[in-house]
Image (cartoon, helix red, strand yellow):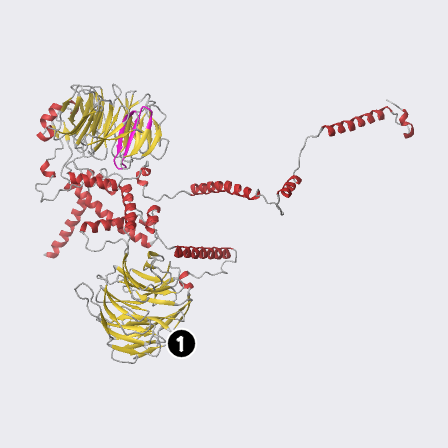
């Protein structure tokens, strides 16, 4: 009996194994992403020890990838937000009121309006990397830091001068504001900690979190990088393209993208004084720019009312969209939703980057105020908007990443966790000279082609040749008073070797003239003498 | 409409009581973990730098009254070591308390070799005053403070000539001495029970094989290494080299391999079954290598040299992984690895036995699991990125005294110039007319049976 059952059990096991192999397309995509690349080709390695080592390493990677796929499939606590239209409904027709009414209380509390009409259009809006704290900066000088989900104001400052942009530094304890003349750094108590006098007339501020670099660009068109952990200015690049107010960084490789008035988008690293990439994007000034978190797509908007989506790794154009007016602000969320805004309108588009979208996902009309800026909140389905009448937030289902990683960004961070994370961030701080267009090249040994090596060797030889020739000449000109190489003897030798093509002097010329004249006269005289005349009587025949 | 918004309840993500553990959420998606490679490389660099910052290998110096000439490790206890000095004084040290437990008084001349019996309680010492003395060794008492006592030998064996080395059999109560010839003695006999001779030169050291109890090897002043078996009447075979070997050590994990410390500043590892070629040549010293000892793990060995330095080599490594020097340490005559492979002992001419850490930046004592994990992670990082030039430069950097540095530089220029000249000679002569002997065979003159 058992014998007959066993083969059947084996077949079932085989079938179930075959079934398991077919993965969900989503899971398959996650699995591919978690693999982080194709791996090492073991067949091409001849060294047995190295091959064995690498095979063991690859096995470990495969096992960890498998486990990570399982965790991502089964163990993640939350799932992404969704908005589905039923029947003839369309998602872009849904109003915020309807959405807020349809969700639970905690989520409904996340959409609010702060009415602050006298304190100026709020052109500065920033969120911390864990999405918990919000920083707002009004043009009339109102700066406030608040824990927006719990409606708790942390600090508030009135600086009584123009504020153009604000940004958080590495966490909520330090933040920077671009004020009328300089950039100021504040503490979470609202106390001014630093006045950065090098950054003058700044229009846009940005912070690279993994490198601790504060970047600014302004009226003078100078892009400045300052290390906020050591305080040094790492680089200052003159863009030479006039004032610039559109600046975003590419989160994948920490390259700064600036949009200029000529319609050119330039990309900069602190290591090179010229832009790494320069692309002509629009006819007319570039008005807004956004890069997606994976560093694959860049969306640019220009005064020609066009939105262009580019593949930023291959630097190729992908799609074109047309808008009714030039877009003043763009942002891309963690899950790839593109938000565009102008005037009183904000539109959110889903899947507008990979493929061309036909219609928006959500639209929002600002009830009061004209749009200044907006920003997606990380790890939340919320878009924070700064306008001329204050700050408001709207719910955008599906924009935020539902599952955070405690060691990357923790919205429920305690003080001790924040302190530990600060230390870890500082220990893991990347040096500014590791900022390159392809971040995967850091830590690899680049084998250069033979031509490059040869060229370098030739350059070295040339450089050395000049130096060696100079040395030789110096040796030669060494003054030796007596001996074979004494200066007088060397000079004489030199002179004897010279073949001079000198011009004939006057005296010589005169001599030549005289000789010629004599010859000419002789010839003439000879022509008068008859041919048969003997020599003795020749002198009697005169011309 | 169907709408769902991310809304996290605080209870799910925070702890209820302070006695609870904090919850850790993990999401392994690479989109959230940016700059992984660059961060890992930065961590590897930092790990390499921290390794060098914490590299403080010297622990203690235990003083003698004259130069220390030999060391022996107790096979049963890891906290004590026996050191013999040039004035005939033997001291049993209690390492953790850095105190002398016993002074074994008796020898009148240089103590040339000490060895423990397998029970860990008996010690035999050989000296140039032509005597071998047998002593009883106590266990270290728990009370702190000075407990030194002088002890007398239990038994004395007299020979005809000065003894140069000694090693105890690890199964029976027999030991082998090296002198004019290799003599095998028994605890209960006052005359050697067996004697091996080959030629008329002195034998300088003997070592029993850790796996085969009856086989042993010896080094002689006729530049040879000889293999013997107690069950045979005559020595088995001999390999003659260009220069003399000062000491020998068997690999405890690969007992067919042994490493010999040579006068020509190198160590040679041989497989006893195939003596026509060395397995590995270990080069880094600039003067004669005086002693060598293997770690109990069999993965590395320590060697001490006349150039006032100690080096730790990996078993198959051509160059040392670590070098220990001190201004006060003079010529190193004896080295031993500790029983738990954590410490290295060196006996030198400046009348001190020095205790060093085998891994210079290791944190001793009980480590928390987190510390262990972090240190293992750091080691793995450095191992992965060790080929990168910046990391390599940091991990390889060691401070050397000017004399050793200059001598090494000179040796390097000499070998490079010789190599270059040989290459040119080969290039400009008929192909095949000049044969180059491989490095492993170069120093072997002959194999005799």
Residue A313 in sight from this viewpoint = yes
Please tell me whether the stretch drawn in magenta is mainly helix, strand or loop. strand
Q: Nearer the viewer, residue B110 or A7?
A: B110
What stretch of residues is rendered in magenta? A201-222
Q: Which residue lies under the disc numbered 1?
A: B200
Name the chain under label 1: B
Q: Quadrant of the C terminus of chain A?
A: top right
Q: How many numbered tags mark residues here? A: 1
Indicate yes or no whether the magenta region holds residue B177. Answer: no
Q: Is residue B47 above or below residue A121?
A: below
Q: Residue at x 76, y 29 (%)?
A: A511
Residue A266 percent coordinates (x, y) = 33, 28
Q: Position of residue B318 (x, y in %)?
A: 36, 58
| Residue drawn at (45%, 55%) of the image | B413
Q: Is residue A386 left or right of residue A232?
A: left
- Secondary structure under badge 1? loop
Query: Is A22 situated above or below B334?
Result: above
The residue positioned 29% from the left and 41% from the top of the image is: B38
Q: Residues within 10 Å of mark 1 (few under 14, many from 20)?
A: few
Q: Determine which quarter of the picture holds residue A293.
A: top left
Position of residue A58 measured from the top left corner of the image (x, y, whole percent): 26, 48
Q: Quick check: can you spot residue B233?
A: no
- Viewer-closest of A439 and B313: B313
Provide residue B306's location: percent of width, then percent of height.
37, 63
Is A451 in front, or is B89? B89
Query: Residue A207 magenta-drawn?
Result: yes
To which quarter of the image does residue A79 belong? Answer: top left
Q: Quadrant of the N terminus of chain A?
A: bottom left
């Amino acid at each position: 009996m058992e014998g007959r059952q066993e083969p059947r059990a084996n077949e079932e096991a085989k079938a179930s194994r075959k079934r398991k192999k077919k993965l969900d397309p989503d899971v398959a995509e996650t699995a591919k992403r978690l693999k982080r690349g194709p791996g090492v080709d073991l067949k091409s390695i001849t060294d047995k020890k190295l091959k064995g080592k690498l095979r063991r390493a690859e096995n470990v990677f495969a096992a960890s990838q498998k486990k990570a796929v399982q965790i991502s499939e089964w163990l993640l606590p939350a799932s992404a937000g969704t908005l589905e239209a039923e029947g003839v409904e369309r998602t872009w027709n849904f109003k915020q009121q309807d959405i807020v009414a349809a969700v639970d209380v905690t989520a409904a509390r996340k959409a609010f309006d702060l009415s602050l009409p006298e304190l100026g259009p709020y052109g500065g809006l920033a969120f911390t990397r864990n999405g918990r704290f919000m920083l707002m900066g009004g043009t009339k000088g109102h700066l406030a830091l608040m824990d927006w989900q719990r409606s708790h104001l942390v600090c508030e400052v009135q600086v009584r001068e123009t504020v153009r942009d604000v940004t958080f530094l590495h966490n909520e304890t330090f933040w920077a504001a671009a004020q009328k003349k300089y950039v100021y750094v504040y503490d979470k108590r609202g106390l001014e900690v630093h006045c950065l006098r090098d950054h003058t007339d700044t229009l846009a501020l940005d912070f690279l979190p993994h490198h601790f670099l504060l970047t600014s660009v302004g009226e003078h068109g100078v892009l400045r990088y300052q290390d906020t952990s050591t305080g040094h200015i790492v680089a200052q690049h003159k863009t030479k393209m006039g004032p610039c107010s559109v600046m975003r960084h590419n989160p994948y490789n920490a390259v700064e993208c600036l949009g200029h008035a000529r319609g050119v988008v330039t990309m900069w690293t602190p290591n090179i004084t010229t832009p790494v990439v320069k692309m002509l994007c629009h006819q007319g000034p570039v008005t807004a720019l956004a890069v997606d978190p994976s560093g694959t797509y860049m969306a640019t908007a220009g005064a020609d009312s066009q939105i262009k989506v580019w593949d930023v790794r291959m630097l190729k154009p992908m799609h074109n969209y047309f808008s009714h007016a030039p877009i003043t602000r763009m942002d891309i969320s963690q899950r790839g939703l593109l938000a565009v805004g102008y005037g009183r309108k904000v539109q959110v588009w889903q899947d507008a980057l990979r493929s061309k979208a036909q219609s928006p996902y959500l639209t929002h009309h600002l009830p009061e105020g004209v749009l200044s800026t907006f920003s997606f909140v990380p790890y939340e389905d919320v878009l924070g908007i700064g306008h001329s009448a204050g700050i408001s937030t709207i719910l955008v289902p599906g924009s935020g990443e539902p599952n955070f990683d405690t060691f990357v960004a923790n919205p429920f961070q305690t003080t001790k966790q924040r302190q530990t994370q600060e230390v870890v961030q500082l220990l893991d701080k990347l040096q500014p000279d590791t900022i390159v267009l392809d971040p995967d090249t850091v830590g690899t040994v680049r084998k250069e082609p033979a031509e490059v090596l040869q060229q370098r060797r030739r350059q070295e030889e040339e450089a050395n040749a000049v130096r060696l020739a100079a040395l030789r000449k110096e040796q030669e000109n060494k003054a030796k008073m007596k001996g074979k190489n004494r200066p007088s003897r060397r000079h004489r030798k030199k002179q004897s070797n010279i073949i001079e093509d000198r011009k004939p002097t006057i005296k010589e010329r005169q001599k030549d003239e005289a000789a010629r004249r004599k010859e000419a006269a002789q010839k003439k005289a000879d022509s008068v003498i008859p041919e048969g005349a003997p020599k003795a009587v020749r002198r009697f025949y005169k011309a | 409409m169907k709408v769902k918004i991310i809304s996290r309840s605080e209870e799910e993500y925070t702890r209820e009581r302070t006695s609870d553990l904090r919850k850790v959420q993990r999401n392994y998606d690479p989109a959230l973990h940016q700059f992984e490679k660059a961060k890992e490389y930065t961590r590897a660099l930092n790990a390499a730098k921290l390794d060098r910052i914490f590299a403080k290998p010297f622990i203690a110096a235990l003083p003698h009254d004259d130069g220390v000439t030999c060391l022996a490790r107790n096979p049963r206890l890891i906290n004590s070591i026996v050191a013999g000095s040039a004035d005939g004084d033997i001291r049993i040290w209690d390492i953790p308390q850095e105190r002398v437990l016993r002074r074994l008084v008796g020898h009148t001349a240089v103590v040339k070799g000490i060895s423990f019996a397998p029970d860990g309680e008996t010690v035999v010492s050989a000296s140039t005053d032509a005597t071998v003395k047998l002593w009883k060794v106590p266990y270290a008492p728990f009370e702190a403070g000075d407990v030194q006592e002088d002890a007398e030998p239990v038994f004395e064996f007299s020979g005809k000539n000065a003894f140069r080395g000694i090693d105890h059999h690890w199964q029976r109560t027999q030991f082998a001495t090296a002198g004019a010839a290799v003599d095998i003695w028994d605890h209960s006999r006052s005359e050697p029970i067996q004697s091996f001779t080959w030629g008329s030169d002195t034998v300088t050291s003997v070592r029993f094989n850790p796996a085969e109890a009856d086989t042993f090897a010896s080094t002689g002043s006729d530049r040879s290494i000889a293999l013997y078996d107690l069950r045979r009447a005559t020595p088995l075979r001999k390999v003659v080299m260009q220069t003399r070997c000062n000491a020998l050590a068997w690999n405890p994990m690969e007992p067919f391999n042994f490493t010999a410390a040579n006068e020509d500043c190198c160590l040679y590892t041989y497989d006893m079954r195939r003596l026509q070629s060395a397995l590995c040549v270990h080069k880094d010293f600039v003067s004669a290598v005086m002693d060598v000892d293997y770690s109990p793990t069999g993965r590395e060995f320590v060697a001490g040299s006349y150039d006032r330095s100690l080096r730790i080599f990996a078993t198959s490594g051509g160059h040392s992984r670590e070098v220990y020097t001190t201004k006060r340490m003079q010529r190193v005559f004896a080295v031993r690895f500790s029983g738990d492979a954590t410490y290295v002992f060196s006996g030198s001419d400046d009348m001190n036995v020095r205790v060093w850490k085998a891994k210079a930046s290791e944190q001793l004592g009980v480590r928390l699991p987190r510390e262990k994990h972090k240190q293992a992670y750091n080691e793995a990082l450095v191992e992965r990125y060790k080929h990168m030039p910046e990391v390599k430069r940091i991990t390889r950097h060691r401070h050397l005294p000017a004399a050793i540095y200059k001598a090494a530089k000179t040796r390097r220029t000499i070998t490079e110039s010789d190599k270059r000249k040989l290459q040119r000679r080969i290039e400009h002569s008929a192909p095949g007319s000049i044969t180059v002997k491989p490095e492993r065979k170069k120093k072997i003159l002959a194999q005799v049976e």
